[in-house]
């Protein structure tokens, strides 16, 4: 709706001073919404990428260094019973956070008892890989957290701007209905440009967004559709 209305105003400029002010404000809102829509999508992409990468790291860590340390620990525990519980990989809960805590505890224990474990085959390269994988996992945890924050912040501002845009378009609509009362084609074009689609259900992540590229002719609509309520 915002982008279409801006395009309509550009195609049929009004000489009315108040309408020119409103059209200028709407362009500013449109430009900001486009930037926020891009930030919103980047946040979602960051969250998705982090989620996929965390799962990959988890599988690689379980398949290589964790198995290695657990087996070396089991062998060492035969002669050193006090080690029997240190290298059993048992996350407190079946989640990525549970994996993260259990893996970090196992690595720290292996580093602490490194000299004791070496005679049983502990590999320095496996410990190094273990640390690298967990380090990468921590980076992805932060990326996911930052991405969710970026998405949420952009979403909040988009909702505020969507409300502002609706008010501007309503004000312009009153003028345009009078301006084009004898030009049904132009009036119909205005009504079509200022029409909005249904908003997502409350609580949905599919928040209203601007129409990226809508400031140019032929721009594609945004993934979230137009803003609501109708004007």
Image: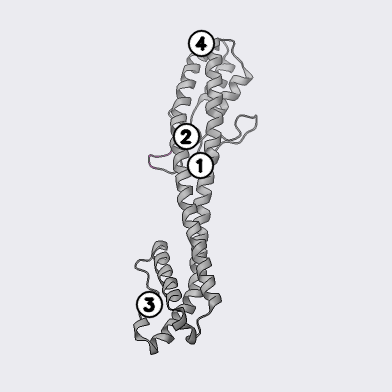
Tell me whether the residue at label 2 lies in contact with that at label 1, contact meaning CB atoms closer than 8 angstroms.
yes
Mark 2, residue position: 158
As helix, strand or loop, the secondary structure at mark 2 comes to helix
Where does the image place residue 115, in percent across and percent down from the top left? 46, 81
Q: CA distance from mark 2 to mark 1?
A: 9 Å
Q: Nearer the viewer, residue 154 or 195?
A: 154
Going from the N terminus, do you reach mark 1 or mark 4 first? 1
Left or right: 2, with 116 as reference point? right
Going from the N terminus, do you reach mark 4 or mark 2 first? 2
As helix, strand or loop, the secondary structure at mark 1 comes to helix
As helix, strand or loop, the secondary structure at mark 4 comes to helix
Where does the image place residue 94, in percent across and percent down from the top left? 38, 66
Going from the N terminus, do you reach mark 3 or mark 4 first? 3
Q: Give the magenta-colored segment's residue range.
A: 198-203
Which corner quadrant holds the C terminus? Answer: top left
Mark 1, residue position: 40
Tell me whether the residue at label 1 lies in contact with that at label 3, contact meaning CB atoms closer than 8 angstroms.
no
As helix, strand or loop, the secondary structure at mark 3 comes to loop
Mark 4, residue position: 178
Q: Is residue 61 visible?
A: yes
Tell us which disc is closer to us: 4 or 2.
2
Q: CA distance from mark 2 to mark 3?
A: 50 Å
Q: CA distance from mark 3 to mark 4?
A: 80 Å
Tell us which disc is closer to us: 1 or 4.
1
Going from the N terminus, do you reach mark 1 or mark 3 first? 1
- Residue 12 occupies quadrant: top right
Q: Main structural element of the magenta stretch: helix, strand or loop?
A: loop
Q: Is residue 198 above or below residue 173?
A: below
Tell us which disc is closer to us: 3 or 4.
3
Tell me whether the residue at label 3 lies in contact with that at label 4, contact meaning CB atoms closer than 8 angstroms.
no
Tell us which disc is closer to us: 1 or 3.
3
Mark 3, residue position: 86
């Amino acid at each position: 709706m915002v982008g279409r209305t801006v395009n309509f105003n550009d195609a049929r400029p009004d000489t009315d001073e108040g309408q020119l002010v409103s059209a200028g404000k709407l362009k500013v809102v449109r430009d900001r919404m486009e930037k926020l829509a891009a930030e919103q999508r980047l946040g979602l992409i960051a969250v998705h990428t982090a989620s996929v990468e965390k799962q990959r790291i988890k599988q690689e860590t379980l398949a290589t260094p964790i198995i290695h340390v657990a087996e070396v620990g089991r062998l060492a525990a035969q002669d050193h019973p006090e080690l029997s519980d240190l290298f059993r990989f048992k996350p407190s809960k079946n989640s990525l956070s549970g994996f993260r805590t259990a893996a970090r505890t196992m690595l720290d224990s292996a580093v602490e008892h490194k000299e004791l474990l070496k005679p049983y085959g502990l590999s320095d390269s496996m410990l190094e890989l273990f640390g690298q994988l967990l380090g990468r996992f921590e980076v992805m945890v932060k990326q996911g957290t930052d991405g969710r924050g970026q998405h949420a912040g952009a979403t909040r501002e988009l909702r505020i701007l969507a409300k502002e845009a609706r008010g501007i378009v309503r004000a312009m609509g009153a003028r345009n209905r009078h301006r084009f009362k004898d030009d049904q084609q132009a009036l119909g074009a205005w009504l079509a440009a200022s029409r909005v689609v249904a908003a997502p259900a409350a609580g949905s992540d599919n928040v209203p967004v601007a129409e990226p590229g809508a400031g140019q002719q032929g721009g594609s609509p945004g993934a979230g559709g137009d803003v609501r309520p109708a004007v």
